[in-house]
Image (cartoon, rainbow, N blue to C red):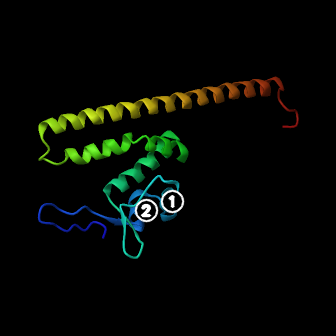
Amino acid sequence: MGGKRTATATQAAPVLWRIGEVAKLTGVTTRTLRYWEELGLLQPASRTDGGERIYGAGDVRRVTRIREWQELLGFSLDEVKAVLSTGDVDVLDRVHFELRDSEVSLSRRRALLDEAIAANDQLVGRLEDTLARIRALRDERAAIALRLRKNRAELGVDAGY
């Protein structure tokens, strides 16, 4: 399944991966992928007749994005879900996919790019809000650290050391 392409009369079929392959590609566990599915963060592109999860390239991008938001931005899964639920990211993915089609008319390309700009601007706004909250939390913690250090310094050196 993973990495195999089969050509149709008009275009190549998308590459599809099983859950274990996606886990290896993205550096998360299969258990994490199943958990994210339970939370509604990720839905497999399809399932085999036997119920095995099958993922497409968009799903792999989504897993990578979720990991990046958690690791780079410190987003909780609830925050990731909130951003994903706005649809902005899905719009950007859809537009990106549609723009890859060389037969899309110039007027449609303009409309798609306008849609992408609007979705991206909304996403940037949400990220700015999140960064502002992170900065406020950091400033609060830094102020607490200063107070703690001051309180500790006021106690002086322990003669027992």
Indicate which disc residue 23 carries. Answer: 2
What residue sits 28% from the left and 35% below the top? 115
Indicate which disc residue 32 carries. Answer: 1
What residue sits 46% from the left and 41% below the top? 83
Tell me how far mark 1 sits from mark 2, CA to CA: 9 Å
Indicate which disc residue 12 carries. Answer: none
Mark 1 residue element: helix
What residue sits 41% from the left and 57% below the top? 26
Answer few, some or many: residues within 10 Å of disc 2's Cα (few below 14, many 20 plus, some between 14 and 19): some
Residue 67, percent from left and from top: 46, 49
Residue 61, percent from left and from top: 36, 51
Q: Amino acid at mark 1?
A: Thr
The image shows residue 97, relative to residue 108, as above or below, that is below
Q: Nearer the viewer, residue 72 or 157?
A: 72
Residue 73, percent from left and from top: 49, 39
What residue sits 44% from the left and 55% below the top? 42
Q: How many marks?
A: 2
Residue 123, percent from left and from top: 40, 34
Mark 2 residue element: helix
The image shows residue 128, relative to residue 87, as above or below, that is above
Disc 1 to disc 2: CB gap under 8 Å: yes
Does residue 83 show up?
yes
